[in-house]
Image (cartoon, grey):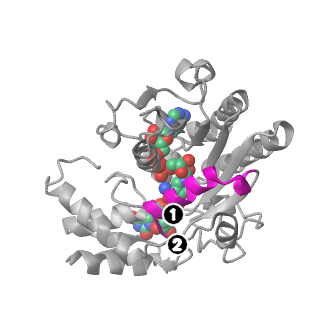
Amino acid sequence: MNPLKKIIVTGAAGFLGSCLTKRLLAEGNQVVGIDNMLSGRESNIAKIRNKANFTFIRMDVVSQEVLTLQPLKGAEEIYHLASPASPKFYQAAALDTIAVNTIGTKNMLELAKANGAKMLYTSTSEAYGDPEIHPQQETYRGNVNTWGPRACYDEAKRLGEVYCYEYYHQFGAGVKVARIFNTYSANLRNDDGRVISNFVNQAIRGQDITVYGDGSQTRSFCYVDDTLDGLMLMMEKDSATGEIINVGNPDEYSVLHVAELVKKLAGSNSRLTFHSLPKDDPKVRRPVIDKAIRLLGWKPQITLEEGLIRTIDIYRSQLSGSDGGERA
Ligand code: NAD
Ligand code: UDP
């Protein structure tokens, strides 16, 4: 079978990148994945590594060399996902995080321009910072502290968006920007540090569930399948070109509620313990998804409870070794 399209995925060995790559391959596309393994892992791509339609290149997308790579030539679509996303990882590599979202994004836009390809950039709800407007719609300009530990991620993503804006307006590049809200599944690393990965792994091991602050801060959690549907629709639809679109689940929960729900669903005896709240931790977060509904006909289908049950089951089978230790 001839591949449908040649598609580049940066961050292909990460959480979302590896799940996306598997979906694109399953549709019959040819995928070139690029990753420097800053927060990715080999096991995420082990099962597809030898597939005929998949090429993996270990490289930093900040490097100029990426613009000269032969396998990238003729790509029709670029999903630019490279960037650590967990506060634990991006704060440990702050300068790399700034570079990948700015210079790395510019490089991918150059590739898109040279190939006449469409490009989707994965920005973040963090572009809204610690929001003063609730819930957040795309027109809200955000409240980000430039002088703090989250700025390397938040401000770099915002500048990444600016690069997308300029390439769209100056060169007519087929750019789309997704502001993704907290997405999860058992494909997150056990040591990823983000809340669902921490809580579920702690609950199934009988360890203390570590709530930061009093747990009254809120987030809106989207199961990976829903987020990927949204991203792929954005790539497909011309209506999303030149647009920023929130991709997230509008159901909002406090972190304390999530801790109690995970404990209950996992049938765990873990204790909840309370720890200091990280600096600049946003107090609330919930997307308005009217634009996604209007332009893409997309809205999430999987409830938090359903997604957590799946996540707990899979992490548990990984722990017992019954799934061979590798995610499908
Ligand atoms: P992740 O950390 O699991 O994956 C990111 C991948 O990018 C890793 O494999 C990492 O090694 C790779 N990478 C980092 N810097 C690179 C570089 N310079 N060159 C090449 N590869 C590099 O994160 P994720 O959760 O899969 O997030 C993917 C993208 O989606 C990120 O851009 C992130 O900001 C965005 N996003 C994710 C969420 C979420 O909830 N998962 C929310 C908002 C935005
Ligand atoms: N959090 C928590 N315990 C943990 C990890 C995170 O209480 O073990 C909180 C964190 O302080 C934040 C929320 O959960 O309020 C979501 O954190 P995460 O790192 O997953 O993503 P963020 O939305 O902050 O980027």
Residue for point 60% across, 23% down: 73
Q: Amino acid at mark 2?
A: Ser
Which of the marked residues, 1 or 2, is nearer the chain's N terminus? 1
- Up/down of 315 relative to 266, above or below: above
In the image, which residues are magenta? Answer: 221-241
Which residue position holds label 2? 220
Is 228 covered by the magenta stretch? yes
Residue for point 55% across, 18% down: 70
Q: Quadrant of the N terminus?
A: top left
**Residue 292 on image: x %, y %:** 65, 66
- Up/down of 261 relative to 236, above or below: below
Residue for point 25% across, 61% down: 314
State the SS at label 2.
strand
Residue for point 44% across, 46% down: 27
Which numbered circle lies on residue 15? Answer: none
Density class for disc 2 (Cα within 10 Å; few <14, some 14-19, many ≥20) is: many
- Left or right for 18, reference 200: right
- Left or right for 10, reference 117: left
Is 265 covered by the magenta stretch? no
Any atom of ligand 1 within 8 Å of the CB at mark 1? yes
Q: Camera-side residue: 55 or 57? A: 55
Measured Cα–Cα span from mark 1 to mark 2? 6 Å
Find residue 259 and report its image quarter. Answer: bottom left
Q: Residue furthest front?
A: 1
Q: Amino acid at mark 1?
A: Asn
**Residue 154 on image: x %, y %:** 64, 53
Secondary structure mainly formed by the magenta segment: helix
Density class for disc 1 (Cα within 10 Å; few <14, some 14-19, many ≥20) is: many
Q: Would residue 39 be visible to someone looking at this image? A: no
Q: Are marks 1 and 2 in contact (CB under 8 Å)?
A: yes
- Up/down of 230 relative to 5, above or below: below
Which residue position holds label 1? 182
